[in-house]
Each structure stands twice: as C-alpha cells, then as structure tokens.
Amino acid sequence: MQKPQWNRIKDFVQRKELSLAMGLHLGAIFLCGLIYILLPEDIHLRWGLTYWLIWIVLLSPIPLMIAARKSKRKLVIRLYSGVIGIGLWLFAIFLQAIGGDIFLPPTYFCKDGDYLARQYRYDFFENNMTAIYKVIRLTERRVAFYRYSSPDSIKVYDSLNVIAFYCPTRIVEDPWVSDTIAPIRVIEQLYDRPIEPEQKKEVEQLAHRLNARLGYTLAE
C-alpha cells in the first residue's frame, strides 16, 4: 500500500475517532440535561442508568483530549476538554457534598414486590434515613421517606396504606461516645392520603399481630 493512501486512511480513522468522542461527550451531556429537566427529583431511572450517564459525562473529556492528538484544532479541543472536565468534576463534588447522590445510586436495603427501600440523604447531616421507592416500568418513584436506618426487611400492605419496617440492632460509633439502638418493628403510613377509621382499626390489629408499634405517621 502506498504511503499517501495509508496516510489518508490514517487521517480518516483519526477524524472518526474525534467525531465519536465528541458525539459521546455531547450526547451524554444532552441526555443528562434531558433527564434533569423531565424527571422530578423523586424519580430516577432503574438499574443505575442515570449514574452511568453521569460517569460518561465526567470521563468523556479524557478520550476527547486523546482523540484530538492529530487534529488541526488540537489546542482548542484540549483546552475545552480541560476546562469542561474540571468544571464538571467540581460541580459534581459540590452536589455530592450538599446531599445529592451523584456518583453512586442510594444504598439498597431490601424490597417487597414493587417497593424498594434505599438510603435517603435529606442533606449533608441527615443521611441515616430510609426512602421507599415504587418500581414503575423503567423508573423508581419515591413515595415516602422515614427516620429509620438500614431496615433488613419491609412489608407493604397496599389495602391499608401502611408499611412495616424491621430494623436490626444498630451500633452507632461516635468519636466521643458509642450507642446501641435497639431493634425496631414499626408500622408507618405509606402514601400521604387519609386513612379511614375502619382502616385504622385494621392497622391496630395488624400491629398487635406483628408485635409492632405504630409509628409517628400513625400516632395521631
């Protein structure tokens, strides 16, 4: 194969590499923006798809810089990649610090049917709470969150609009003092809608059968 022809093939491959890297970078940014606009805060995609996109956005400036090695606009592309890469990482770290789940999905605890229990971070300081999500097609929709930490099982009673939590003994390690939290068996209201008096009686009977107490959402 003649050298000029080889050089043309090489240039073609390098241009395709750059186009692919740029398309991946801009496409991931576009999809993340679309998800942010269309999906409310209490809904996220299943199987960690949102977080895969976030990692692609954060890491995509690196292959973009590599793909630009023979481009005539190498300096501009690499300058853009460096600035946007640093900016995206700083923004992601800031969101994570103030309580967002940016790098990894919330910790999964347990499930019952279409309902999942995950760790819920209300803010930087309140991060030992539990959120309940309902699986709806490709999404998980948060329906409620509670002041309980790390349940090992849950049981949802849709007809009564309640959920039972079973939390094991937990040891809280603190720099100055340690504390042991007793196991919890508690029933809470699931959806924010009124519970009829007849339902309330059934919930009280359920609590008696399960040897569980009524939680703060049912205390009134």
Image (spheres, rainbow, N blue to C red):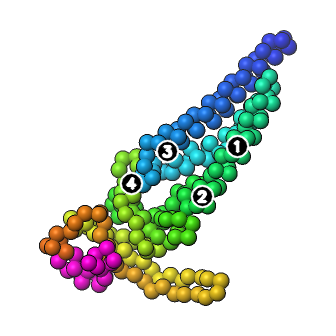
Q: Which mark is residue 141?
A: 4
Which numbered circle lies on residue 96? Answer: 2
**Residue that label 1 marks:** 85
Indicate yes or no whether the magenta region holds residue 212: yes
- Circle 4 sits in a helix, a strand or a loop, which is it? strand
In the image, residue 142 lies at what x, y percent?
39, 58
Q: Which residues are magenta?
A: 201-220
- Can you say which quadrant of the picture contains the C terminus? bottom left
Residue 66 point in image, percent of width and height: 76, 35
Between discs 4 and 2, the one toward the N terminus: 2
Is 179 part of what is drawn in magenta? no
Q: CA distance from mark 3 to mark 1?
A: 19 Å
Q: Nearer the viewer, residue 217 or 46?
A: 217
Q: Give the structural element (helix, strand or loop) at label 2.
A: helix
Residue 157 occupies which quadrant of the picture? bottom left
- Give SS at disc 3: helix
Q: CA distance from mark 4 to mark 2?
A: 21 Å
Q: Residues within 10 Å of mark 4 (few under 14, many from 20)?
A: many
